[in-house]
Image (cartoon, rainbow, N blue to C red):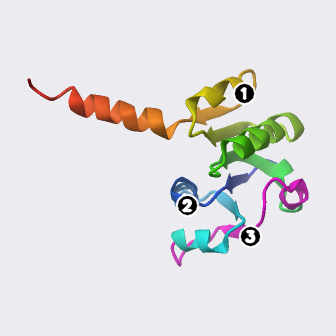
Amino acid sequence: MRNKTFIIGCGRLGAAAAVDGYKKGENIFVFDPDTTAFDRLPDDFGGLTFEADATDLTTLEKQGIRDCRSVLITTGDDNVNVFLAHVCDKLYEIPNIYVRFDDPERKVLVEGYNVKCIYPFELSFGAYQGLKGGDRQ
């Protein structure tokens, strides 16, 4: 039964998603190689945290990645994110995979995969464009 959500990378996006999922009753597992990243999580966070390099697939398997319904990949390295997106789709067949890319051109590396991409630059620029659209000359 796929009932877990893995969040790989506990930066601002990963931490916010972990808290949101936990508050919604999801079974949240958060991975980051830097334990100080978990300081972003509130004291009452009830999900599980793992100081681990998620590219070590043994770590993911020990925590039950095969039981994942969703994975959010938000490390600070687009190359790592591409690798993990490929692994989650092709090796573990996770139904819902979300990956953050700093570089929108990375999208071609996951075309044809079951991966939804998040691009902070495009989201921020789109918001800026929307705000600027209200300017009067």
Q: CA distance from mark 2 to mark 3?
A: 14 Å
Reading the chain from its start, which is encountered first: label 2 or label 3?
2
Q: Does residue 61 appear to the left or right of 16 in the view shown?
A: right
Kind of residue at disc 3:
Glu
The boundaries of the magenta stretch are: 41-61
Q: Taking the image as drawn, is residue 94 in sight?
A: no
Reading the chain from its start, which is encountered first: label 1 or label 2?
2
Seen in the picture, residue 128 relative to 17 is either above or below; the reply is above
Which residue sits at x=69%, y=69%? 49
Q: Nearer the viewer, mark 2 or mark 3?
A: 3
Kind of residue at disc 1:
Leu
Which residue is the site of mark 2? 15
Q: Does residue 122 appear to the left or right of 94 in the view shown?
A: left
Is disc 2 placed on a helix, strand or loop? helix
Please provide percent x and percent y for residue 56: 86, 56
Nearer to the camera, 92 or 106: 106
Please provide percent x and percent y for residue 7: 67, 54
